[in-house]
Amino acid sequence: RIKEQADQFQSLLTYLPDYVSEILRDGVILYVNRTLPPWEVKDVVGSHVCDFLPEDERPRVRQLIERTFATGETSRHEVVICDQQGRPRQFAGRIGPFWRDGRVLAVMIIASDVTDQRAMEDLAQRRQRELDRLAKFATMGEMASIVAHYLNNPLAAIANYAHGCIRRMRLPAPDQDQLAEALGEIVQECNRASGFIRQLRGLLQKREARCDQFDLAEVLRDAI
């Protein structure tokens, strides 16, 4: 009965899509359920785990194994390993302790091939960035339309008042009061355009939203 259960468990591990390995304190692989070609199980068992890792990943994996033996904590790590055709495959691993009699005898590593998943995530991010870029262009077009709408009237009024001042100044005896009134209107229209730009800059500032009380009638008057 025990042998039958052990065979069933071994069969389960053999056909498990994840890669399960048992690592001793010195980094030697004691057990592995399956391997990435061209390696075979007989070639991997008894070897050091770092022999199958890229050079730059080895110190980090050693550190995680040592920490698991020292603290019994479970950690996660991702590593890129090239397959038989030299194509990079990305693996997400969970490194945890194998306890017996209150102490960590070995480290269990369960690694999943997440290459396709990461590729889909990267594609989704690229598409999201493209959508964001298109949205920015659309927003810029809307903002340009708004700016043109709000600035055309003050600019047209300033141009009209300025032409009126020029015509009056060419008269033999220009009316100073009318000139002062026209220049005052120019100043007012300039302030109006400047106020709109300040409002626009305030709208585009990055700041936290807040809730507050306000006078609705004032908002409606401003809209009108």
Image (cartoon, grey):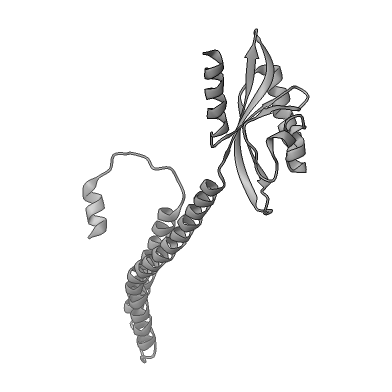
Residue 168, x across and y down, in percent: 35, 86
Observer-nearest residue: 107 or 69? Answer: 107
Tell me which residue sits at (76%, 27%) in the image.
28
Tell me which residue sits at (35%, 67%) in the image.
146
Tell me which residue sits at (50%, 53%) in the image.
125
Q: Is residue 202 above or below residue 28?
A: below
Quadrant of residue 169 within the rendered picture: bottom left
Observer-nearest residue: 136 or 158? Answer: 136
Observer-nearest residue: 41 or 207? Answer: 41
Q: Tell whether 116 sits left or right of 70.
A: left
Observer-nearest residue: 146 or 101? Answer: 101
Residue 112, x across and y down, in percent: 57, 38
Quadrant of residue 45 within the rendered picture: top right
Q: Tell whether 146 sits left or right of 76.
A: left
Tell me which residue sits at (36%, 66%) in the image.
142
Can residue 107 be seen in the rendering of this structure?
A: yes
Q: Tell whether 168 sits left or right of 83.
A: left
Q: Is residue 144 above or below residue 77?
A: below
Residue 55, x across and y down, in percent: 77, 42
Check the picture and name the quadrant holding the C terminus.
bottom left
Q: Is residue 101 above or below residue 148?
A: above
Figure disc tally: 0
Q: Residue furthest top?
A: 101
Residue 216, x across and y down, in percent: 23, 47
Can residue 176 be seen in the rendering of this structure?
A: no
